Image: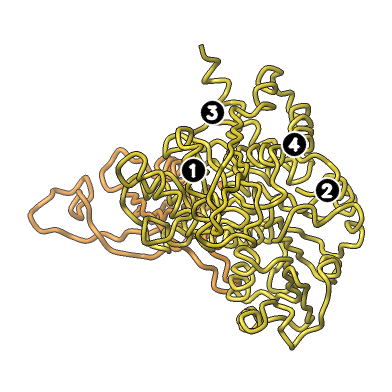
Chain colours: A orange, B yellow
Amino acid sequence: MLKKIECFLQPSKLDEIKDELVKMGVEGMSVSEVKGFGTQRGYLEEEKINKKVKFLPKAKVEIVVDEEIVEEVIGAIRKLCAAETIGAGKIFVIPVEDAVRIRTAEVGKSAIY
Amino acid sequence: MRGEFNPWQMTLSQLDEVAKEINLDESIHQILRHPKRCLTVSIPIQMDNGKIKVFTGFRVQHNVTRGPAKGGIRYHPSVTLDETKALAMLMTWKCAVVKIPYGGAKGGIICDPRKLSLKEVERLTRRYISEIISFIGPEKDIPAPDVNTNPQVMAWIMDTYSMDVGYSVPGVVTGKPISIGGSLGRNAATARGVMFSLMNAAKKLKFDLFEKTIAIQGYGNVGGNLAHLLSHEGYKIIAISDVEGGIYNPKGLDPRKVSLALKGSGSVVGFKDADKITNQELLAVDCDVLIPAALENQISQDNADKIRAGFIVEAANGPTTPQADKILEGKGVFVIPDILANAGGVTVSYFEWVQGLQAYFWTEREVNLKLRDIMQKAFDKVYRISEERKITMRKAAYILAVERVAEATRVRGLYP
């Protein structure tokens, strides 16, 4: 079965993550520039948090992988992104019912590898 | 399994070969060489003319180490105990290849159903089931359709068993009609599994299926459904056959039109827009993919060297004799073996049993996606073994299956 890994990360980590995941056999990735906030409510650690929530620039990374490598992918992203400060990001794992490669009509796992 | 050789001896020698290849523990090898239980039963029934006739039936449970026994029941004049034993062992391997929690079984009655009325078939079925009733059940042994048995026969089996225990037990048999707990997608499951196997091969061997031509021998439940599924995907079928003979058109055949012709004339040969060929000619037709979906022993040492296809997908059980297999291997033909290619049927039977036990039924889409996932995993595993050991897909499938059953036997240990 396929899983989508959707994560919200610090944009500065993107290149390293891309290289590491490609090494693992991940064959596709989409990245978007987004704005958001999490537990940090949009404040950097050194800032004083007040009531007003702010947005910070984040990178949203979406990849679809076979469930067998989900743990490995999460491990790699965490290893590269783990910071002692707040605001390192979040990883979501979402079940994917099916996938279709438009050109060849291949489906399921064959559509993504 | 007609022909001069004994199907049981043939199946045993296949096991012996694999045992040697993987250095199988000798004790486990001995256990696997013997079916757990062989029942021979006499089945007296009243014929429509009032006379009593006694038939002979079998039920063989080869192995139940990984779960309850599972296997079809066939009605055919050529049924023998040895054939039933062989097919029961093949079911053990088939269930293990796709990793569903069943052991192998098979059953049969020596009879010619064409010479029996519907009522006689019903009485035969009910009496046969009552003779083996203490050995079957959802946790023990779950029959299914095979040659000349269909959802109606399964309904009679379910009813006979349920009447005996006093409540409805849908899980005692699979391949039932939908109205009494059959699974959506069961009817075309074997064909769908065959198609997934072919697609998985195309992916691994990096060829474009849309550019390949396909010939299918057999137009029954498997061959017929398969032709429609493949054509729906946009693949090109150039030859089709049934018992009466075959049709060939290099420009492609439309199964919907072939089925219409079949309805009118009783055979695919009734289809006008194609050349007539024999079943033997179909096997030797100039195509890329050959799918035997009819009887056993169709590809033998007499015709194996004439085969022009580069890929064979065994939708039927045992369509290739061991001698033919050697010839095909020498020619470099890629064969997806029966215990992998046609395991979609038993896989959706397993889904039907699971749904019956839960009394909660899935959509057809759910069934098909779960089937695809299981077929893909099994194919990948078998392919990896064949690459690592540089052996055929058949040998690789047997190795995977025997290793799984052997491991289960080892951890369970010997009782008492």
Q: Can the viewer see residue A113 in this picture? A: no
Q: CA distance from mark 4 to mark 2?
A: 12 Å
Question: Tag 1 or tag 4, which sits nearer the N-term?
Answer: 4
Vertically, is B237 above or below B260? above
Query: Are the residues under badges 4 and 2 in a single subunit?
Result: yes
Q: CA distance from mark 3 to mark 2?
A: 32 Å
The residue that mark 2 highlights is: B3
- Amino acid type, callout 3: Thr
Q: CA distance from mark 2 to mark 1?
A: 29 Å
User: Which of labels 3 and 2 is toward the front?
Assistant: 2
Crowding at mark 4 (Cα within 10 Å: few <14, some 14-19, many 20+): some
Residue beneath the point at 9% across and 52% down: A50
The residue that mark 3 highlights is: B65
User: Which of labels 4 and 3 is toward the front?
Assistant: 4
Q: Are marks 4 and 1 in contact (CB under 8 Å)?
A: no
Residue beneath the point at 77% across and 78% down: B247
Residue beneath the point at 65% across and 66% down: B223
Residue beneath the point at 43% across and 38% down: B137
The residue that mark 1 highlights is: B129
The residue that mark 4 highlights is: B8
Which structural element holds mark 1?
Answer: helix
Percent coordinates x, y for residue A70 in the rendering: 45, 46
Vertically, is A99 above or below B38? below
